[in-house]
Amino acid sequence: MTQRTAFVTGGTGGIGSAIIRYLASQGHRVATNYRDEAKAEAWRQAMARDGIEAFMVQGDVSDPVACEAMVRALEEKCGPVDILVNNAGITRDTTFHKMTYQQWTDVINTNLNACFNVTRPVIEGMRARKWGRIVQISSINGQKGQYGQANYAAAKAGMHGFTISLAQENAKFGITVNTVSPGYVGTDMVMAVPEEVREKIVAQIPVGRLGKPEEIAHAVAFFTGDQAAWITGANLAINGGHYMGW
Ligand code: NDP
């Protein structure tokens, strides 16, 4: 397999860490961003203990100016980005009639606008080199909507609109653009949901359990391989059968 440089935003989180580990196990150079120095260093050391050298650049994905600088700093460290996984994300749940503008914009900026902020500085290089893989980590709730998540569902649905437009614009340049839409995975984001709510969620999942971060990483790795060159504009639902819409 050709060694590529893979940049996974939010790589220090539950799903991001699993994606970093999976891509590293395939021989790729792996990189992520961070915001907090101390947290980043602890994460980097944990990766190093497992034999993974992860390059790290500071940057907030919701800030377009910081993202341009972040991508350039990353290129200095480990070369041009071949594989980009737009994974960083947050929730700020509340019903819409109680939602503040801040809760709305925080979620849109971090989940959706981040796709512009991080992809824009890498796309021209991918087009020039005639190879690239871009994967958006969306969500089941972008596909079906969710009570208390108008901000998050709007951002996550928007991410797939981004995917299918970018896929069309860049197909002739050897670049594929796809979306992975996970259902409920047992990371900090979901473990922060009250236990009784989580139990109700699990009861709705035909497979009968939360997903594992590695199961999402496996799908991302599938999309980023050379053999996936004819798959573009797809939205792969990985949710234990929780939502089977088209
Ligand atoms: P985590 O909360 O474990 O990780 C989120 C990551 O995103 C962290 O590394 C966090 O860094 C980073 N991040 C958040 N905001 C920013 C920002 N403004 N700038 C830079 N980095 C930021 O979440 P998960 O691993 O569970 O989720 C990963 C993705 O998967 C998200 O997009 C989420 O919406 C999506 N998803 C998750 C599901 C689940 O069940 N867990 C289900 C469906 C989709 P920091 O430590 O600095 O906060």
Image (cartoon, grey):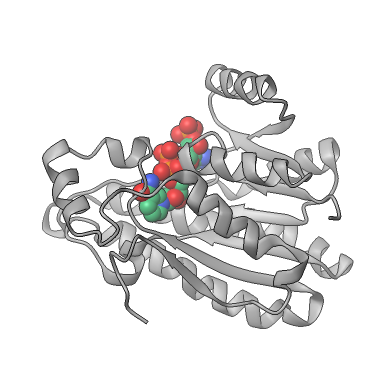
Q: Which of the 4 quarters of the picture holds residue 146? A: bottom left
Q: Position of residue 120 (x, y in %)?
A: 67, 61
Does 185 appear above or below 188? Answer: below
Number of numbered tags placed on the structure image: 0
Quadrant where the N terminus sits is bottom right
Q: Position of residue 32 (x, y in %)?
A: 64, 39
User: On the rendered structure, is 102 left or right of 120?
Assistant: left
Quadrant where the C terminus sits is bottom left
Along the line of sight, the residue nearer the viewer: 39 or 178: 178
Does 47 appear above or below 182? Answer: above
Along the line of sight, the residue nearer the viewer: 83 or 237: 237
Q: Position of residue 113 (x, y in %)?
A: 50, 58
Residue farthest to the front? 207
Along the line of sight, the residue nearer the viewer: 149 or 237: 237
Residue 144 visible in rendering: yes
Q: Residue at x 23, y 48 (%)?
A: 93
Q: Which of the 4 quarters of the picture holds residue 240? A: bottom left
User: On the rendered structure, is 84 left or right of 112?
Assistant: right
Q: Quadrant of ligand 1?
A: top left
Q: Position of residue 57 (x, y in %)?
A: 68, 34
Does 42 appear above or below 147? Answer: above
Residue 110 visible in rendering: no
Does 161 appear above or below 154? Answer: below
User: On the rendered structure, is 37 left or right of 55?
Assistant: left
Q: Residue at x 47, y 66 (%)?
A: 159
Q: Residue at x 49, y 72 (%)?
A: 235
Q: Residue at x 50, y 63 (%)?
A: 180
